[in-house]
Image: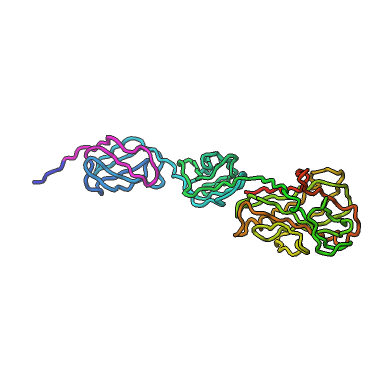
Amino acid sequence: GSEMCIRDRPTIISIEPTLGRFGDEVIITGTNFDPQIVDNSVKLNGITASIKSANPTSIVITVPDGASTGVIEVSVINFDVSGPTFTVLAPLPVISNITPLTGGVSETVTITGENFGGNITDNTVSFNGTTAVITSSSTTSITTSVPDGATTGPISITAPGGTVTSSEDFTVLTITTLSVPLTSDDDDVEEVAVSFGEPIGTMDLGSSDLELGEISSGQGLMNIGLRYNNVTIPQGATVTEAYVQFNADNTGADAVELTIYGENVANAAAYTGTLGELSAKTLTVANVVWSIPEWVNKGDRGDAQKTVNIASIINEIVNRTDWMSGNSINIIMKHTGVSTGVSSSSGGREAENYSSSKPDDGAELIVVYQ
């Protein structure tokens, strides 16, 4: 005779966990499952799941790709049973690249990866805990900018699938404005470039003013040197703006052109007054032309008395491998263009020199760096 195996209907007691993402494991606990994997079938909201293991009281599955939130169904031989609802979470976002990895406040940053929200409002980005504004978003790319108040640290993205944090830190560059005054009578100097009396190369370390584009009486057309000490810019910093602020010692409306250089050394030495000392200096490759506006009033210390941006010159010096914070920088100004053939002792520009009795009159170097 033959025997018929009477099987009890399976039951589902619980699932653990009750929510997860594609590929996550789920343990279904119950009764009367088949110990043979092939004799069991599990679906999540109609999508067949892969079974990893089975015994009479538990089945382990992985959440199938493409599944959505819905009921877990188990089929054992000829029996079908439905269990609790399993919630399918959106896939976790993945950060694959951040460009750039350093920047100052407001700098644009692009984050590429996977599983971001397609709409801007689906995502939140924070720089080391400070929330940023998102300007564009797709499932694989987010464009944002460094928020005010951000500090160096990881970038976090919260998307529909959860929160992920970058493995690399984003370095927030702080913006520093440095004001460096002249501190010695010997640090603003003139050198005869075209003689009107004194020999070419004659150095004047104690002049009562600085002639820019006009003849210094009895001397000639003068090159200018300005040596700034204790310039506390870190080696390798990025200078975004720099200029020299003069104080007008007289009025002047003639066209004046100076070309500004730096001395291309790591630490500018003090002037000694030897013949031809200024013109012997090694100059930076970077140079900037300054066409000086009219100076309307004696004593003015405004935009007209401010050089054009000389950031390129300062960058060349502070990015030297031998530059050290606290070193001295020498700014050198030479007459070019309309100012090379000047023969007048008036109509150009005269700037106040540094004097210990009126130190605030001296030319001041302003540098903005990150």
The colour scheme used here is: rainbow
Q: Residue at x 27, y 34 (%)?
A: 13
Q: Residue at x 36, y 36 (%)?
A: 85
The one nearer the camera, 140 or 330, is 330
User: Is residue 88 shown left or right of residue 102?
Assistant: left
Q: Quadrant of residue 119?
A: top right
Residue 71 drawn in magenta: no
Q: Is residue 129 above or below residue 180?
A: above
Q: Quadrant of residue 265?
A: bottom right
User: Is residue 153 shown left or right of residue 353?
Assistant: left
Image coords of residue 301 (percent x, y): 80, 44
User: Looking at the image, which residue sits at the far left?
Assistant: 1
Q: Which residues are magenta?
A: 6-32
Q: Is residue 72 above or below residue 190?
A: above
Image coords of residue 337 (percent x, y): 84, 61
Image coords of residue 334 (percent x, y): 79, 59
The one nearer the camera, 309 or 188, is 188
The one nearer the camera, 24 or 184, is 184
User: Is residue 254 shown left or right of residue 261?
Assistant: right
Image coords of residue 39 (percent x, y): 24, 47
Report the label total.
0
The one nearer the camera, 206 or 211, is 206
